[in-house]
């Protein structure tokens, strides 16, 4: 029997609007922070707009708001049509939409306030983590509900990618959000040091895999055949692509931690799987591009296909570059430099951005039952966007090579050729300017697209409920004999499928993480490493709040070029009390792991007050508010208690002593500053952060 | 390379060997499944996005 039903286009439209709005906001913040790197005055002299605080805002906005909403737009559109069914529940769709937007708004508020966990791309604090979990489950129920009530017995490969996305992101998010709350908006990760780093980069890498890649591959497998009006090049290849991609990706996280204190075998495992990852990634890219076989003439005419072709090509480039960067020899130069930033943006601007734009240009006219307002403007967007990517990436590659090589260069006498880190920064400032130009061009294209899409929508009318009809699935199976069982099996299939995907992704994660968590010899302890004093602990939290980790690493790799510059290389045992780890992933400024004792207290005071006075030409923003703001010591007891719960050996009852010790240490630092003609009260935040900075690396220095 | 890190791990080879085993097994299974897929089914599946009516 043929059934009549309606596709929900309104929810698709809403997610499309959210994609565009958050895209513009996220990219504008990106442009601002890009300009802060050559014009520190753009930090605007207040704490809420400094680089360290709004860089996470940029990354979260483009990943979870722009790309996130685009994923939901693509999934809600394609899922309904592939399954010949309306979304399971309109109410769940609405909760999903508004819940997700609220989460983003809470990120926009909390991140500039400095409420952050400091885990990259997982900065949001614990109450928001819980909200994300709930909304993600709502999405999952809505998706699986639709799959179960479907009228198409087969599940197209795009849906497989959606299911894998749902299940893996759920696992990643939960495991990387094990935090012990200290207050309403402050928590400490359960893991410390090396283990925390391993969990974070298992998460970080696979957020790229399962948020920025698999859902987009699903969308590619749906929208590209529709645009080209021909089936995917090889369906079998898409299946191989799917299983091998989700299986291999999950192992590759440790390539973010090469040459760090992570056990060597885990690093090697990460490298091996990263190299293997080329195969499924390129399988997918080739499958996408070859889908256009015989349709290349359309690419000339059709701006949506242009976006898709460049997007898929960017995917190919980024997934070739990724494994190359995972090779230890290349990583030695590239890590901590702008090369990584360039690499990420080829993926983000090219793959995610361009696929999103292509889909928007294709989808909006269809749900508004009209034609695209202007193909010319779309073509303009394509060209300025492509040029934007080139202007963004090429200067940063250049900056990355330059800085990476400068850090490593020795004179004939065997000393560092550029001992002053700042020299290597000033060298690449022109590249930062060009990069910002590229970003501005890209953003300009997005604004043109917005105009084009508004005009398109105005010319048509949203078909909120699109009529469709299909045979009911149940009638295909006359309930008799073995058919009944088969039908039941098929009904259950999405769940079995989810469990299968779950098993596949858990294997790699578990094999990598379990030895580091269970075998003590992987993290040798060092007797002289002691817990932070209460003042240092508070200072560390100020360091986290200001997002210092966005520009300063605390991980010295075992190279002569690094030990000469920063001191003894980092040992796993040094981080056993670090909840969270603060190794960082980018050195816009120098490494700080051994900065303790290197400069006087008054140097730090003056440097934080105005970095340019101590390091002329520095691009670090000033932090005057640390001098005026009083340190909140009411949290000390809760923090000491939380740390003890996590295994940091503070004596029982020490929490009551802690604030006395804190005051004493603060008075000593204030007195030392006073001696050097710096008048500051001992209860200010700057005292705590100086205490923390002066402690860094001191534990293993020979006394 | 493999020899080097196997030496480092001492009693943890079991993790590496089993992961390699699972990995190889996994590809063999996917390969068999793909080989056994019916041509009609593959054709039907690959045309799913094109089945519906669009503008």
Image (cartoon, rainbow, N blue to C red):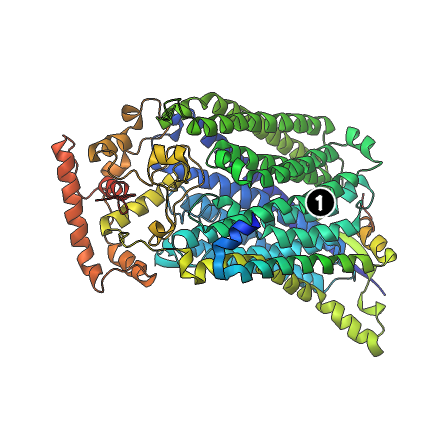
| Residue sticking out furthest to the right | B40
Find numbered disc 1 in the image and state the secondary structure of the residue it sits on: helix
Q: Is residue A209 above or below residue B11?
A: above
Task: Name the quarter where the N terminus of chain A is drawn.
Answer: bottom right
Question: From this viewpoint, is residue A160 visible?
Answer: yes
Q: Is residue A1 left or right of residue A11?
A: right
The x, y position of residue A573, in whole percent, is 35, 52
Q: Quadrant of residue A33?
A: top left
Q: Is residue A68 above or below residue A181?
A: above
Question: From this viewpoint, is residue A547 visible?
Answer: no
Q: Quadrant of residue A389?
A: top right
Q: Nearer the viewer, residue A12 or A539?
A: A539
Q: Nearer the viewer, residue A213 or A406?
A: A406
The residue positioned 81% from the left and 43% from the top of the image is B55
How many marks are shown on the rendered structure? 1
Q: Quadrant of residue A190?
A: bottom left
The residue positioned 69% from the left and 42% from the top of the image is A282
The x, y position of residue A155, in whole percent, is 75, 58
Location of mark 1 (residue): A284
The x, y position of residue A95, in whole percent, is 57, 56
Task: Name the quarter where the C terminus of chain A is drawn.
Answer: top left
What crowding class fits label 1: few (fewer than 14 Cα within 10 Å), some (14-19), or many (20 or more)? many
Q: Is residue A50 left or right of residue A388?
A: left
The x, y position of residue A50, in whole percent, is 38, 35
Q: Is residue A1 left or right of residue A198?
A: right
| Label 1 chain ID | A
């Amino acid at each position: 029997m043929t059934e009549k039903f309606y596709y929900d286009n309104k929810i698709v439209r809403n997610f499309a609007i959210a994609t565009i709005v958050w895209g513009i906001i996220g990219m504008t913040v990106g442009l601002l922070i890009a300009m802060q790197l050559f014009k520190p005055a753009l930090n605007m002299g207040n704490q809420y707009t400094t680089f360290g605080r709004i860089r996470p805002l940029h990354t979260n906005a483009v990943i979870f708001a722009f790309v996130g909403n685009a994923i939901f737009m693509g999934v809600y559109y394609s899922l309904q049509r592939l399954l010949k069914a309306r979304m399971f529940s309109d109410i769940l769709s609405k909760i999903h939409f508004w819940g997700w937007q609220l989460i983003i708004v809470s990120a926009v508020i909390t991140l500039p306030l400095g409420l952050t966990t400091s885990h990259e791309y997982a900065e949001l604090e614990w109450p928001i983590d819980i909200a994300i979990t709930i909304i993600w489950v709502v999405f999952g129920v809505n998706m699986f509900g639709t799959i179960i009530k479907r009228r198409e017995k087969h599940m197209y490969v795009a849906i497989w990618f959606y299911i894998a996305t749902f299940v893996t992101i759920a696992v990643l998010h939960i495991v990387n959000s094990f935090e012990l709350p200290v207050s309403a908006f402050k928590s400490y990760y359960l893991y410390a040091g090396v283990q925390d780093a391993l969990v974070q980069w298992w998460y970080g890498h696979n957020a790229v895999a399962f948020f920025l890649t698999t859902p987009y591959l699903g969308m590619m497998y749906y929208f590209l055949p529709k645009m080209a009006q021909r089936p995917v090049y090889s369906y079998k290849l898409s299946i191989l692509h799917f299983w091998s991609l989700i299986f291999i990706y999950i192992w590759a996280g440790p390539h973010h931690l090469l040459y760090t204190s992570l056990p060597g075998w885990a690093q090697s495992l990460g490298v091996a799987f990263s190299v293997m990852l080329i195969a499924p990634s390129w399988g997918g890219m080739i499958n996408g591009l070859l889908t256009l076989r015989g349709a290349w003439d359309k690419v000339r005419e059709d701006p949506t296909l242009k976006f898709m072709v460049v997007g898929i090509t960017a995917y190919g480039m980024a997934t070739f570059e990724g494994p190359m960067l995972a090779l230890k020899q290349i990583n030695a130069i590239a890590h901590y430099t702008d090369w990584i930033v360039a690499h990420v943006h080829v993926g983000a601007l090219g793959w995610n951005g361009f696929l999103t734009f292509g889909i928007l240009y294709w989808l909006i006219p269809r749900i508004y039952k009209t034609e695209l307002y202007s193909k010319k403007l779309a073509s303009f967007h394509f060209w300025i966007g492509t040029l934007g990517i080139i202007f963004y990436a090429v200067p940063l590659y250049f900056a990355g090579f330059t800085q990476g090589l400068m850090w490593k260069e020795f004179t004939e006498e065997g000393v560092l050729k550029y001992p002053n880190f700042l020299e290597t920064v000033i060298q690449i400032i022109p590249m930062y300017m060009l990069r910002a130009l590229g970003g501005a061009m890209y953003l300009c294209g997005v604004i043109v697209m917005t105009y084009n899409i508004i005009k398109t929508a105005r010319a048509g009318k949203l078909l909120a409920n699109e009529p469709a009809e299909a045979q009911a699935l149940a009638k295909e199976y006359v309930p008799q004999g073995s058919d009944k069982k088969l039908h039941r099996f098929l009904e259950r299939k999405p769940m079995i499928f989810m469990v299968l995907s779950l098993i596949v992704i858990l294997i790699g994660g578990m094999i990598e993480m379990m030895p580091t968590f269970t075998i003590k010899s992987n993290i040798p302890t060092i007797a002289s490493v002691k817990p932070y004093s209460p003042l240092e602990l508070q200072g560390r939290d100020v360091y986290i709040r200001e997002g210092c980790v966005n520009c300063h690493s605390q991980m010295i790799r075992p190279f002569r070029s690094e030990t000469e510059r920063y001191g003894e290389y980092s040992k796993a045992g040094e981080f056993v009390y670090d909840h969270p780890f603060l190794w960082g992933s980018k050195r816009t400024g120098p490494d700080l792991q051994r900065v303790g004792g290197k400069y006087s207290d008054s140097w730090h005071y003056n440097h934080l007050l105005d970095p340019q006075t101590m390091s002329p030409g520095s691009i670090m923003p000033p932090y005057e508010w640390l001098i005026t703001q009083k340190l909140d010591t009411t949290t000390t007891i809760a923090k000491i208690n939380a740390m003890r719960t996590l295994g940091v050996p503070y004596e029982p009852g020490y929490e009551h002593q802690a604030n006395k010790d804190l005051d004493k240490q603060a008075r000593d630092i204030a007195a030392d500053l006073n001696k050097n003609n710096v008048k500051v009260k001992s209860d200010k935040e700057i005292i705590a952060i100086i205490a923390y900075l002066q402690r860094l690396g001191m534990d293993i220095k020979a006394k | 390379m493999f020899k080097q890190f196997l030496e480092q791990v001492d009693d943890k080879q079991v993790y590496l060997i089993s992961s390699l085993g699972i990995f190889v097994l996994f590809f063999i299974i996917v390969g068999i499944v793909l080989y056994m897929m019916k041509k009609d089914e593959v054709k039907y599946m690959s045309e799913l996005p094109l089945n519906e009516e669009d503008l």
